[in-house]
Amino acid sequence: MVVERRDTNGGSGSAGPPLGNVRQYAGLAILVGVGLVGLVLLGASADAPWEWWATAAFAGLGIAGAAGHLLLVELPWRRSAVELANLERRHARECGALTAALSELHHGDLVEATAPLSALDPDMRRVVEVATGALGSLIEQIQMASVEVATSANGVRETSADLATGSSQQASAVVDITASMERLAHSAGEIAGNAARQADLAARAEEGGDAGVAALDAAVAGSEAVLQRIGVIAERADSLGGRAREIYRVLDLITEIARETHILSLNAAIEAAAAGGHGERFSAVAEEVRRLAERSRESVDEVRSLLDEFSGAIRAVDVATQEGSRAADDVLVRSRSTQGAIAQLREALADTARAARDISLATEEQRGSSDQVVVTLRAVRGVVQRTADGLQRFQGAAAKLNQLALSIQLLSQSFRLESRHSLKHLASRWARRLVNHVGNQEAVEVMLSDLLRELPYVEAAYFVEASGAMVAVAANRDLVGDRDLGEAMQAGKMYADRPWFQAVAREGRPVVTSLYESLLTGQQCFTIAAAVQEASLRGILGMDVNARNWTRI
Amino acid sequence: MIRAPELWPVPGAEPQLLGLIQYGGEPLAVLDLAILAATEGSASPGREVVLVLSLANDLTVGLAVEDAEQVVGLDQLGEGGAEAPSTPECQSGVQVLNIESLFEADCRTGG
């Protein structure tokens, strides 16, 4: 039982030879012991009467020893040899299965690695399956983690780009604000100076207002005096007008008398003429009277003329006095109005002076505050600029992180897992589907289109026959747009020189290439290729995955 | 000569008859000399002096004139009659009217 358990536990390789030796040593010891006992019995029975008995005992021991050797040594030995052969065959079979599984594991094919495990011992198979499953789970987690890392990195990069743009705009805005604040500080200084000068001017104007008020008081008093004098002049002019009117009446009376005298002299002259020679002297008197009357009329006319001029002058004086009175009234009214206005102006100037002083003080404080703001803004500009630089470094780090995640993804994709995220597994599955349609180009194209619908992150899928000539190709228009496939991918083109083709053709295993520039989009991509084979290689299925969409895997 | 007497106009009278005045208790017809002498076509105010004339046929009439400046004797005029000599007292020309013939013509016209 102990030997079998050792064999069962895998110790057959080292337990076979010690077990045989023990058995050989045991048989040899029995034979040596029987021989020694016989020799002792033969030596003791040479001269003894019990020689026969000793010979018989020796023969009995010999028979017993031979029987014991047969039963205890030879039979178990033979049985052990058979078991050992069985164990060796089983060991060889399990070693082959284990080697095959490890070979698949060596090539990263965790799906095919479980196929040979059926030949292993259940415990061993369970252990290997658990280890393979754990490895597959670990790889799958690495794949998922790389996708999450890439997604997060993209988010960080986009956010950093937005923040960097915002920071740049903020830096620009801060520069503008700083310039504005500097201009504001300069303007505040000028305003303070202007306000101070305005305060001085207002103070001087206030003093001038005082002088103006005094002058206006004097002007009002003078206007009132002028008005009184004008009143006196008007009264006197009116009195002179009255006298002139009396003179006119006197002149009218004199004129009337002169006319009567004139008529009287004429009648006297007529009467003198009627008297003939007696009336000559009377005629001369009448003529003199007429001449006196004539001179009286002429004198009256001259006086009247002078009186007219005098009256005109009086009227002019009256008009002038009236106008002067009105003007004096206007001057007085305006002087009083101006007096009030100057008083208000003086108060306004006093308020202006106070306001100007307040403005000067406030603008001085504002200039100081503006200077502090400018200093702070310069510091803020530095911080914003450093933030923008840091965000740009963030973008670079995020891009590197994305690239690193893609590298991890590509490394993890080098394993084939029983997972819908394993590109090798998916490619192998679609390759098995294609086996039945090889030779039917239309059916192959339909399958390639189905593949693109099921795997939307694949930008192009194509089937290359075993000779290396492309048979069919399908492009994902959602990713490549309206680009013409052109010479990059066309039926009949040879792909036998491509590394992925050669690797698949040589190994028969799916491969994942490293990143390269797509001939179709000009962007980074990688290819998953899987062999389409039955007994022999029928062709190779290729799938190009755009590096910008790999997180959708 | 009467100066500015109170004049009463006569309704329906000829234009040259300015009206009647009271002279010596009797009405006296006053004619406009300017209209009579045909120097003006219609009566105008300002006839302040009335010359009272006693004509040959014992007719007394008043002639209204603007003014009377001087009494001039006919003998002082030159021989031509109608031509007025210049006098030392009167620098303007004097034209002598024959009042009698004036009224005669008027009477003939009226007769």
Image (cartoon, grey):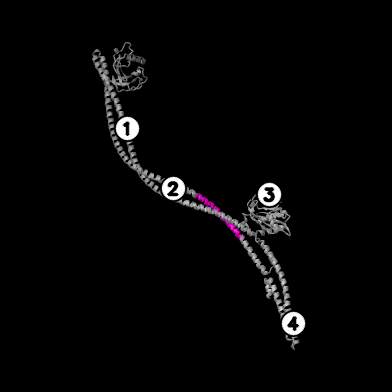
Q: Between disc 1 and disc 4, whose residue precedes?
A: 4
Asked where in the image residue B14 lies, by quadrant, the reply is: top left
- Which amino acid type is marked by label 2? Ala
Q: Which mark is residue A320?
A: 1
The answer for which chain carries disc 3 is A
Give the residue type that dot 4 points to.
Answer: Gly
Q: Amino acid at mark 3?
A: Glu
Which span is picked out in magenta?
Answer: A144-173
Question: Could you say which quadrant of the image residue A150 lies in?
Answer: bottom right
**Disc 3: which residue:** A487
Callout 1 secondary element: helix
Label 3 to label 4, Cα distance in Å? 96 Å
Q: On screen, A242 above or below A43?
A: above
Q: Which residue is situated farthest in the bottom direction here?
A: A49
**Residue A185's disc number:** 2
Residue A167: x and y, percent? 52, 52
Q: Earlier in the sequence, mark 2 or mark 3?
A: 2
Badge 2 or badge 4: first in the primary sequence: 4
Pointer 3 or 1: first along the chain: 1
Q: Which residue is mark 4?
A: A62
Tell me which amino acid carries mark 1: Ala
Q: Position of residue A143 (x, y in %)?
A: 62, 60
Q: Is residue A149 magenta?
A: yes
Q: Is residue A291 above or below residue A111?
A: above
Near mark 2 (Cα within 10 A), the count class, few <14, some 14-19 or many ≥20, is: many
Q: Which element type, helix, strand or loop, lies under badge 4?
A: helix
Q: Between residues A37 and A348, which one lies in front from this camera angle? A: A37
What secondary structure prevails in the magenta region? helix
